[in-house]
Image (cartoon, helix red, strand yellow):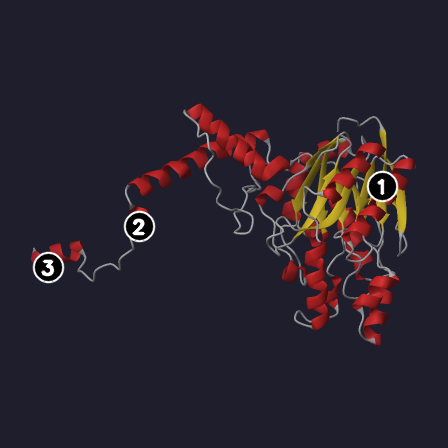
Amino acid sequence: MGAASRPLRVAAVQAAPVFLDRAATTRKAVELIERAGAEGAGLVAFGEGFLPGHPVWFHLHPITHPTSIALSTTLIDQAVTIPGPEADALADAATRTGAVVVLGVVERPDVRSSALYDSALVATPDGSVATRRKIVPAVGERIVFTAGAGEDIRTFDTPFGPLSVLLGGENTNPLLTAALRAMGARLHVACWPPHFNKPRLMPELMTITGRAVAYQNTAWVVSVAGATSEASIDRLATTDEQRALLEATTRDPASAVFAPRGAPFAGPQPGGDGILYADIDLAEGAWANLVNRHYDRPDLLRLVVDRSPRLTAMTFVREAPSEAPATDDGDADAAIRREIVDRFGDRLSSAEVDELVPYVRGIRATGDRLAALGLDAVEPEAPAATEPAERAADRNA
């Protein structure tokens, strides 16, 4: 960690959104970032799906229940497009306070499509914004969220070193957390939703996973959950039984901070809105990390991580060729590199972009050759029912 000798104040912001209201929730997030920044926080973390709210209604209603359909439709309308005004407001807050901001968002990459992602937005004091998407939406989340891809197995560059962020149940995946450890993350944010489907489950799971990741990755873990407002309960519950369940589960969130050897360090934060602060020593755990790495044995045990992006119909649209095509291989590669950067932004490193350039060039060259042969106009024919040549040769011998 580059700033290992300097203490870092972290803030776990356990807060309820202004439920399914993108603009109002963004304003609340900015206010909370500024409040934490005024207290000296260098890292300000929010729960999963904070902006504009997590689809917790699937704990209560069937998928096609009118309430689920209505709330899901509102979620689509209020989801966040990045880049966009909400991301700009969060980046401005990070710059003004000098804090790194981690915030769970419901991301809608393309307003022409209803496809959504369960994402983490990370804004840094230099004004940059980066994201990663949850690679496996869980249970009811699968109804509204598209899965992320290999490019979302990543860390974020911060003034205090590589930062890792996982959403909900991703924190229970030992291969995924091991990959983040191998990427050098010694500070981890575990974002959790406002509540689960039954009481007392969330605090137990947040504690088990938080301590496990802290110990195995010799990392500081900021485990932060959302919260539930009375207004959202009014919108979610349609029966007295559902209201009672929500009132019980909203007392559960237990945001906490765990030290690199797994010991509880701060918290848990009681249910409801509140900010949990902790002053952490980034150098703590360096010796334990050294010792633990001796057990890795990469000659015997290897973790293979496929970080390649996945193509999806809603995000990849064939674009018209540029008006000024490149005249040589160097110009062509530069044009391809620009297209990749425009499409993926900072989700790919410079080295990863360089690796993709020859792949894209080869695909395009093959397409051009096939087009020149006229194969794009040829309809495939069913194979003739002929006798295999080897069998015919044997018979004629």
Q: Nearer the viewer, residue 151 or 117?
A: 117
Three-letter code for the amino acid on which mark 3 is drawn: Arg
Q: Which residue is mark 2?
A: 377
**Residue that carries the numbered disc 3 in the rendered image:** 395
Q: In front of the other: label 1 or label 2?
A: 2
Question: In whole angstroms, how far apart are the C-alphas of marks 1 and 2?
Answer: 58 Å
State whether residue 118 appears in this view: yes
Identify the residue position indicated by label 1 in the image: 33
Q: Quadrant of the N terminus?
A: top right
Task: Measure how far apart labels 2 and 3 are at the Cα level.
Answer: 39 Å
- Front residue of 14 and 121: 121
Q: Which callout, 1 or 2, points at the residue further toward the start of the chain?
A: 1
- The vertical placement of 53 against 153, above or below, is below
The residue at 79%/53% (across/down) is 206
> Is the Cβ of the residue at disc 1 closer than 8 Å to that at disc 2?
no
Expressed as whole percent of the image width and height from the top left, the position of residue 227 reads 84, 56
Task: Locate residue 301, reporting x and y percent.
Answer: 57, 41
